[in-house]
Image (cartoon, helix red, strand yellow):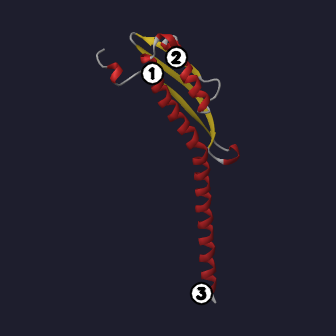
């Protein structure tokens, strides 16, 4: 009889542990589902910014100033990557090179029901690299 009670207690502990593990996995999954797309968009924007400044140096004069060309390309990348509209964008000429900076913050629900929100901060400054910069 005492053996039967012991086995029931063990099953109850296993059930509680399973519930705890499932809850933790669900919370991690929720955080990942909300964080990964924002981080991916940030990485994509950084790559688009790098491409824009390199192309800005090689752009013929008929397309306007290099700064305006880069600014237009980055504004399109901002719209394509679901970046907040109030993002700060600055493009300036540094001697013979261009420099672009984008800054924004985006709130991410890490825990369900708004229990914990993480502020993702994107602050990137890019300058051209590669073959166009050789010889400077």
Which residue appears at 47% of the width and 31% of the height? Answer: 47
**Label drawn at residue 55:** 1
For the residues labelled 2 and 3, the Cα–Cα distance comes to 79 Å
In the visual, does 120 lie left or right of 51?
A: right
For label 3, the SS is: helix
Q: Position of residue 30 (x, y in %)?
A: 62, 50
For the residues labelled 1 and 3, the Cα–Cα distance comes to 76 Å
Which residue appears at 63% of the width and 80% of the height? Answer: 8
For the residues labelled 2 and 1, the Cα–Cα distance comes to 9 Å
Q: Position of residue 59 (x, y in %)?
A: 45, 16
Residue under circle 2? Answer: 69
Residue under circle 3? Answer: 3
The nearer-to-camera label among 1 and 3 is 1
Which residue appears at 53% of the width and 30% of the height? Answer: 122
Binning the other alpha carbons within 10 Å of mark 3 as few (below 14), some (14 to 19) or many (20 upward) gives few
In the image, 34 versus 67, the foreground residue is 67
């Amino acid at each position: 009889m005492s053996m039967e009670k012991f086995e029931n207690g063990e099953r109850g502990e296993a059930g509680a542990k399973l519930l705890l593990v499932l809850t933790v996995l669900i919370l991690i999954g929720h955080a990942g589902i909300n964080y990964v797309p924002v981080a991916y968009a940030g990485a994509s924007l950084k790559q688009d910014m790098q491409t824009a400044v390199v192309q800005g140096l090689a752009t013929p004069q008929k397309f306007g100033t290099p700064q305006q060309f880069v600014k237009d390309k980055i504004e399109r990348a901002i719209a394509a990557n679901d970046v907040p509209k109030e993002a700060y964008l600055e493009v300036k000429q540094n001697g013979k090179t261009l420099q672009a900076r984008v800054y924004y913050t985006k709130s991410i629900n890490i825990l369900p029901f708004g229990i914990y929100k993480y502020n993702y901060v994107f602050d990137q400054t890019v300058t051209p690299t590669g073959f166009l910069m050789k010889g400077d």
